[in-house]
Amino acid sequence: MNISFWLDNVEFRLRLEEKKENNIQVTLGQKKYLVSTEFLSAHELLLNINGKIYNIIIDFNSSCYSVYVNGRLFKIEKKSASQILGTQRTRLRKRDIKTSMPGRIVKILLQEGDTVREGQAVLVLEAMKMENEIKSPQSGVIKRIGPKAGSYVEGGSLLFSVE
Amino acid sequence: MNISFWLDNVEFRLRLEEKKENNIQVTLGQKKYLVSTEFLSAHELLLNINGKIYNIIIDFNSSCYSVYVNGRLFKIEKKSASQILGTQRTRLRKRDIKTSMPGRIVKILLQEGDTVREGQAVLVLEAMKMENEIKSPQSGVIKRIGPKAGSYVEGGSLLFSVE
Amino acid sequence: MKKMFKKVLVANRGEIAARIIRACREMGITPVAVYSEADKKALHVRLADEAYFIGPSKPSQSYLNIDKIIEVAKRAKAQAIHPGYGFLAENSIFVKSCEKEGIVFIGPPSVPMEIMGQKTHSRQKMVKAQVPIIPGTLESIKDEKDLQLQAKKVGYPLLLKASSGGGGKGMRLVSRKEELLSSFQMARSEAQSSFDDPSIYAEKYLEEPHHIEIQILADNFGNIVYLGERECSIQRRYQKVLEETPSPFLNANTRREMGEVAVKAAAAVNYRNAGTVEFVVDKDKKFYFLEMNTRLQVEHPITEMVTGVDLVKCQLEIAAGMALKFSQEDIEPRGCSIECRIYAEDPENNFLPSPGKIVHFRSPGGGLGVRDDNGVYEGYEVPLEYDPLLSKLITWGSTRPEAIQRMIRALSEYQIYGIKTTIPFFKRILLHPKFFKGDYNTHFIPELEKEEDGSGEEEKVAALIAAGIKSYTESKAGPPLRSRQKESNWKLQGRLRNLSNRL
Amino acid sequence: MKKMFKKVLVANRGEIAARIIRACREMGITPVAVYSEADKKALHVRLADEAYFIGPSKPSQSYLNIDKIIEVAKRAKAQAIHPGYGFLAENSIFVKSCEKEGIVFIGPPSVPMEIMGQKTHSRQKMVKAQVPIIPGTLESIKDEKDLQLQAKKVGYPLLLKASSGGGGKGMRLVSRKEELLSSFQMARSEAQSSFDDPSIYAEKYLEEPHHIEIQILADNFGNIVYLGERECSIQRRYQKVLEETPSPFLNANTRREMGEVAVKAAAAVNYRNAGTVEFVVDKDKKFYFLEMNTRLQVEHPITEMVTGVDLVKCQLEIAAGMALKFSQEDIEPRGCSIECRIYAEDPENNFLPSPGKIVHFRSPGGGLGVRDDNGVYEGYEVPLEYDPLLSKLITWGSTRPEAIQRMIRALSEYQIYGIKTTIPFFKRILLHPKFFKGDYNTHFIPELEKEEDGSGEEEKVAALIAAGIKSYTESKAGPPLRSRQKESNWKLQGRLRNLSNRL
């Protein structure tokens, strides 16, 4: 079986061939791996990759695997055709940045109409007793800033729009 | 609501009255308890009984609650009419004692035809590296002993019958 | 002999409430928990013998609500209140309320608490007690004219600090004269909004500074002992991230001197309770009093690991009027200990908080030399309203390398899934050659953050293979049609890549 | 300086394999696990860096299969094998196989192992080394005539023991002359079937005996140290149940003498590795050599807790040819430590084994002074084929009461649900006034088992209320018809009771 995954916007192609029971050869790039698997539960895997042991937690929803290995989380996408097109399009379109956490707006660093680079901080939100810089996920122009400095925002409310 | 439970062949009657939200008064025997509850999961309860905290794990199957409190397991039966009758009858009838574990029969202590008291050891089974006395669950006469001394038994096989 | 309390109310939540509740249980004291709306299912409630609801999730309406907490203490017939750290732990109004109601506050009396809470007051007091302080002003700066005068005396670079401050708020580093006025104005306004007091004072900025603190214990009978130091220079945005004891930077001489000075500082304010005297140590191992924390410190466990002293039990005994059971000579730290503060934050995304449900939780705590003071459990939902500290993972080793390697091993076993945590960040610190050599100061993390994180390649491959296996297993179980669709993705995605490249 | 191994195979399973794997990881050694069919999902496999399948669940076909284990070690390029305890740990044929293949066996050479494995040999050797042994025969009893002669010399009560024995098998207590012959015959046949050797010897039976053992470490350079004792008198059917250090029964003098004698015993057989010299101590504190265990002991953690020495790491260093890093004067035990062996057994049903799936698992390990060496996890199915030890819960305290109270607290937090465990039984031991006073010997548990278990009333009420609440909650959620049916049960059951009374 051949599968194509996307991780951090890079494509990875895997080829899986069952050699004998519970022994799958995985080809990833130029390398081959011999893999055997024990399912500890639906979400917990004990993988043996070329003799090395990995404890893995894996979740699947909306065409994305969340894979947790040695304390790190990887979001591995299994994009369908239309979804990839969709993402590519919205990437160049207007983006509304919302907050997942309620908190207090400590500072607003840019104004409406300012240009912004990808990764540049737009405002500072205080939540869980910490101040957090909220950054723009893409370069563009700040079209709108929702809250005022010093105000409280609810979870899910708009922080700013960038286009 | 009134409920009747059986625990170790003793009947307990409970009366439950909802006083306000998440505040239930439970009457058990002469005593009254004010109880509030948080469900941590379907099987895990955090009970507050008269201000005291209890962490409880509870399972339900075949008309029996398995309740785990402070390291102790209680099997609380919620018997239906026919089940109670059934138990009473089998109690006086022939009982086949089977082993849940495979193991080796180290010793046989009684012979077919011997009378036996409730709790008296009938044979010794070695399993999980330990020797274990298998006792009669009721007084009566040993009708049959399945295995021979020194033989291996599979899980589920008959050890002895007592009537 | 004085009698131990029968019942103690723990006016806190999270890991520290769990820690105190366990100490109470081991002393035969009935621990009473309090909880807000968000904490109905919290670990500290589950561990307590009794628990009382105290109001909405907002701290000001529950954990900071003095009247409510006193009322519950009276209702539950608790003889004493342990405040933990944070919330009401350094609130002298609360201490006075307890005193008025005849409830024992497990902490210092209100007077030393007030002196140490006000930075310029405590600096003056320390000067009198011949405790070295960082060169700078003893009074708040009066006005802009005074500012110029004092800055000239102190010299550049200098730090402007809020007199009522803490935690880096209302603080500014001034490198040149040109920055002085604007920095002063910003510091003042921040101090005003954070502490309701615009007072600012100036301190000399020390080069390559270390933050090192001394743990002390003081009873009602004038006995004061120090229990060694904690090296707290691994900080991010003025927040401690990792602490260790002993400090790899100190020598035995400086260590003893600092201990003796810490005892002097505590004696100068008639201190009682566990307490921590914080110092800044410069590159020449000269040390200066920074502040005193008049409470149990977050990082107290590493001191317990090397001394064998249970600091919370000592606090309870001191508050009950008992004398310390040991003297300075009895305290012989053994081995080394490290603490990693595991936060619900995303280290790959500028340490943004990451509240939410812990779907899977497996702690390495419990192995030889591995302690885990956590406040969570599998299935628990980390609330938004409070500090994001999930766990303090602590290791002990007979040598520093052993403690470090044990920490690396323990971190590799720690599984918290469902939210983001700082676990991967600690691996970067611990595996850094500078850290392993013990050659670091407060600049360590800012410098580390500039370095590329090269790790994680092996995990990436494992993650991709895991996703592949999972996908393969599902395709074998599912209808054949679906797996055919998957295969055709290759072609489709090729087309799409071409398409998107043209957009 | 000798170099540490790069890769070590752990020829064991369960908690001890997990323990050794963790030590390897902390030393930068790649640990290699082996596993049988039943252990595909076992914890020790999950913790290892590499893992190899070695055959069917039956120990003789996997963990006891010398050829298979040697083959895997060679395939994995492991330089050394750690046997843990049990399985191949005291099998001198295995040691010789390793020697032949150039693989380092992490344990003693085969000669001291063989001497100590044979009870009459070791008794003779100890007599020569002026180590006190229990009065009795130095040779196996030749025949029934010799039996009468020897029994007269030894005196009653006496113990008949298997020369190749251990674990209470082939052992008989003889109180009177009349019982001698039949006991001898039974002991012989049991010894034959258990050890394939019918040899029996006789020992004087000591009154109110204590089982106390001394931990030693011996390197290749003639350095031997003792690391204090472990009191192991809390036994059930000759199996240790709970161990503590220091022994509340010993004084400093006896302790030092026993340590020195243990070193002498080890030196007499040119011992190398960690080892344990077991003694019987009578009511007058006279002590007698019982046997030497030439391996890591199950209860080794309590010694680690008070000395700060990682015994497994020492084993690895000694096997790699390094000298001990400390001498006798450096070993200063601090505080007290207790271990409870938590078995998958039902204490309310004559300790019948209770294998099966662990549906819910929450360990108290990781809190201050609480260590949990376990070999299981939530969702794990405890196999039928092996020892039912689930976990060793260990606490440390600065005093004995602190260690005990900490253990009681920790046990109260330990949740293992789905199988029966010995946790409730430990609460009975720890809360017993005789145990708390430290006034016990090997008769403690047999006497305890005669006492009524009066505890559990409060839990019973809580369990009934919990079932009531659960039932109530379900009835509110379910269809109204069902809850009406439940209410009518009252009447029905009344009728049934009347009916059944008449049967």
Image (spheres, coloured by chain):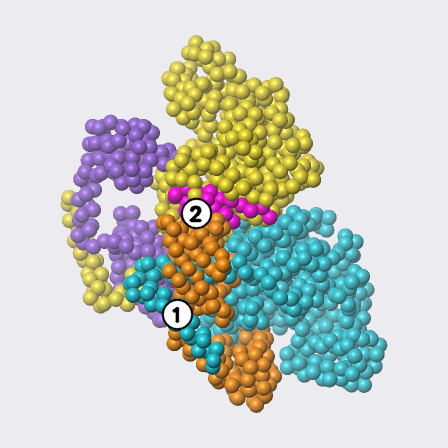
Chain colours: A orange, B purple, C cyan, D yellow
The residue positioned 22% from the left and 68% from the top of the image is: D480
Q: Is residue D18 above or below residue D159?
A: below
Residue A85: x %, y % from top left: 42, 78
Instruction: Return the residue found at the far top.
Output: D145
Q: Is residue C136 left or right of residue D325?
A: right
Residue D42, which numbered label? Answer: 2
Q: Indicate whether residue D51 is drawn in magenta.
A: yes
Q: Quadrant of the N terminus of chain D?
A: top right
Q: Is residue D488 above or below residue D51?
A: below
- Which amino acid, by three-letter code, is at mark 2? Ala
Q: Is residue D481 left or right of residue C177?
A: left
The residue where tag 1 is placed is C491
Q: Is residue A60 left or right of residue A141?
A: left
Q: Is residue A3 above or below residue A84?
A: above
Front residue (pair B123, B49): B123
Residue C90: x %, y % from top left: 63, 69
The residue positioned 65% from the left and 41% from the top of the image is: D3
Q: Which residues are magenta?
A: D28-52
Disc number lying in front (1 or 2): 1
Asked if residue C427 shows in the view, the reply is: yes
Q: Is residue D486 left or right of residue D348?
A: left
Q: Indicate whether residue D33 is drawn in magenta.
A: yes
The residue positioned 40% from the left and 19% from the top of the image is: D188
Task: Please give the chain letter of the residue carrying mark 2.
Answer: D
- Which amino acid, by three-letter code, is at mark 1? Lys
